Amino acid sequence: MGGGMEYNKNKWIEEWGAARENLEHNFRWSRRNLAIVGIFGIAVPVLIYKGIVKEFHLHDDEW
């Protein structure tokens, strides 16, 4: 039916896929990881929230 559809596996893509599947087993906390979580998980959302609230207060007539 669908013959002649063979393909060659790409070594690097297969390694990358295997690494993604096992990420939770190979992950280790480090200073760099903590810094990234602190910046993008805490600081950026807080700054975005504060910016939005400030913008609302600037345009609020009753405030």
Image (cartoon, helix red, strand yellow):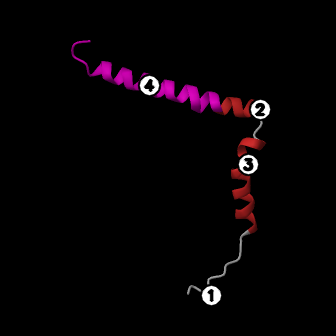
Q: Position of residue 35 (x, y in %)?
A: 68, 29
Disc number placed over residue 49 in the picture, else none: 4
Q: Earlier in the sequence, mark 1 or mark 4?
A: 1
Q: Earlier in the sequence, mark 3 or mark 1?
A: 1
Q: Is residue 3 left or right of residue 55?
A: right
Q: Earlier in the sequence, mark 3 or mark 2?
A: 3
- Rendered image quadrant of residue 31: top right
Disc number placed over residue 30 in the picture, else none: 2
Q: Residue at x 25, y 19 (%)?
A: 60
Q: Are marks 3 and 2 in contact (CB under 8 Å)?
A: no
Q: Which residue is mark 1?
A: 4
Q: Residue at x 74, y 64 (%)?
A: 12
Q: CA distance from mark 3 to mark 1?
A: 33 Å
Q: Nearer the viewer, residue 1 or 49?
A: 1
- Rendered image quadrant of residue 13: bottom right
Q: CA distance from mark 4 to mark 2?
A: 28 Å
Q: Is residue 7 left or right of residue 28?
A: left
Q: Position of residue 10 (x, y in %)?
A: 72, 70
Q: CA distance from mark 1 to mark 4?
A: 55 Å
What amino acid is at disc 4? Tyr
Q: CA distance from mark 3 to mark 2?
A: 18 Å
Q: Is residue 48 left or right of residue 32?
A: left
Using the image, determine if residue 20 lies above or below residue 6. Answer: above
Q: Residues within 10 Å of mark 1 (few under 14, many from 20)?
A: few
Q: Which residues lie in the magenta part?
A: 37-63
Using the image, determine if residue 53 lies above or below residue 29. Answer: above
Q: Residue at x 22, y 13 (%)?
A: 62
What amino acid is at disc 2? Ser
Disc number placed over residue 22 in the picture, else none: 3
Q: Nearer the viewer, residue 30 or 8?
A: 8
Q: Are marks 3 and 4 in contact (CB under 8 Å)?
A: no
- Which one is closest to the eye, mark 1 or mark 4? 1
